[in-house]
Image (cartoon, rainbow, N blue to C red):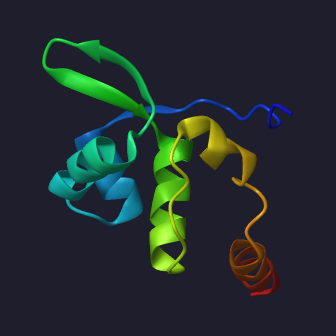
Amino acid sequence: MLPAPHKVEPVSAYDAAGRLDKAASTIHLWALRYGARKLGKQGRKVYYDLNDLRVIEREIRHGHQVPATPLDRAEIADACPLWLEERATKAAA
């Protein structure tokens, strides 16, 4: 079964680092280690799917194993119980 489509948001490693509060080198490491979804390249700058990087970051933060492919990660993008709890807590605040 294909996951529900999400809005694709292309970001460079540097931009993703700022939005995820990580170092750009961490984003590059995730791209290599977990095969973060690449959307394209312009010159030397590679653009990644921010939503895929967010799932990778969330799974690492929660101590879960990061799914092997972007498709597997897309399937769980909105399914993590800890993420849903965090989201509900932020909405209540």
Point 23% across, 58% down: residue = 26
Left or right: 39 in relation to 71? left
Left or right: 15 in relation to 91? left
Q: In which quadrant of the rendered image does the N terminus lie?
A: top right
Check the image and name the residue furthest to the right.
1
Left or right: 16 in relation to 37? left
Q: In which quadrant of the rendered image does the C terminus lie?
A: bottom right
Residue 37 appears at what percent x and percent y? 45, 33
Q: From the viewer's side, name the closer residue of 93 and 19.
A: 19
Residue 24 appears at what percent x and percent y? 20, 52
Point 53% across, 44% down: residue = 52
Point 78% across, 62% down: residue = 79
Does 29 appear above or below 88? above
Q: Quadrant of residue 74?
A: top right
Residue 57 appears at what percent x and percent y? 45, 63
Point 78% across, 73% down: residue = 84
Left or right: 61 in relation to 84? left
